[in-house]
Amino acid sequence: MVNSSEMWWRLGVFAGLLCVLMIAEALWPRRGRMQPRLRRWSTNFGITLVNTLSLRLMGSVTAISTAYLAAQKGWGALNLIIWPIWLEVTVAVILLDLAVYGQHVITHKIPLLWRLHKVHHSDRDIDTTTALRFHPIEILLSMLFKVLIVLLLGPAVIAVLCFEIILNGSAMFNHSNLKIPNRLDKILRLIIVTPDMHRIHHSVRHNETDSNYGFFLPWWDYIFKTYRPQPQDGHENMRIGLSGYQTEAPAEFFWALKLPFMRNHPYIKDD
């Protein structure tokens, strides 16, 4: 079980970083907005609330509680090796990030999963709140995927806790509408996915959406050749979202929840 101190640590880091990034992107925006901020934020935070309630339905079935169980039972590959905790945490975070990269690619390749993932991509602006915009069913499936990976890997509990905090924090950072100087961006994207790098993934152009899948470490995009350095139309002029939904609808709460069940095709190509 996750104790209260772990829960408050995660909540505190999440809330603190969210506020800092929202202020920073308001002061130093990378792009102008297509839709009213308040309307989008109401929808994205509303979806976050639904997701939080949905995860409560899973009870103790979480990645961290599974790590506790794996440690007690000696399950998972990493439990077969005795090594310093710092090294185990480092290896576990890297492997978990690779697993999340693979999961992200799969959500784009399997039509049924893409229908769910479209809720995230349908946002016509991209900012810190976009990192919170996932359909509740996708959130539940994602947690089950992480539980399975934790069972197979057997990472230390502290490693899973660190990864969850890092993943949430880096996702909010790389979805932010924050302007970072080009020289600094080039350095940062050697070790972490930056907003300019991930923004390309939210382009309406299919060939750009099919790139830059990383959430935390950028290495997997380099290794598996899914990396794209810049958008074709430039960051200020590129269109964000999905070609078939360049309307006011994506900013509506109930529309976003119904999107996976609407009759439409997976991609409307705009290459």
Image (tube, helix red, strand yellow):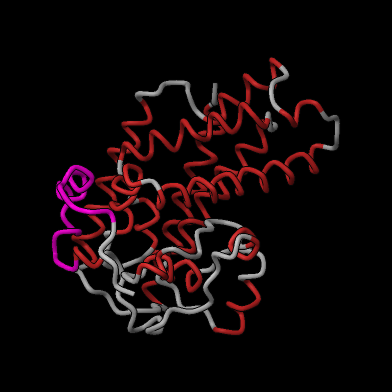
Give the tally of numbered discs.
0
* Position of 132 relative to 198 (above/below): above
Answer whether residue 253 is magenta in the image.
yes
Between residue 197 and residue 87, name the one nearer to us: 197
Answer whether residue 54 is magenta in the image.
no
Q: Quadrant of residue 6?
A: top right
- Report x, y in % for residue 210: 43, 63
Q: Quadrant of residue 232?
A: bottom left
- Report x, y in % for residue 145: 49, 34
Q: Quadrant of residue 75?
A: top right
Position of 246 with respect to 228 (left or right) is: left
- Report x, y in % for residue 140: 38, 33
Position of 82 with respect to 35 (left or right) is: right
Between residue 259 and residue 127, name the one nearer to us: 259
Position of 249 with respect to 92 (left or right) is: left
View extreme (top): residue: 73
Between residue 75 and residue 181, name the one nearer to us: 75
View extreme (right): residue: 83
**Residue at 57% across, 56% down:** 216
* Position of 69 relative to 87 (above/below): above
- Report x, y in % for residue 55: 38, 31
Q: Which quadrant, please, contains the C terminus? A: bottom left
**Residue at 68% across, 48% down:** 94
Between residue 99 and residue 177, name the one nearer to us: 99
Q: Which quadrant, please, contains the N terminus? A: top right
**Residue at 14% across, 67% down:** 247
The magenta segment is: 246-266
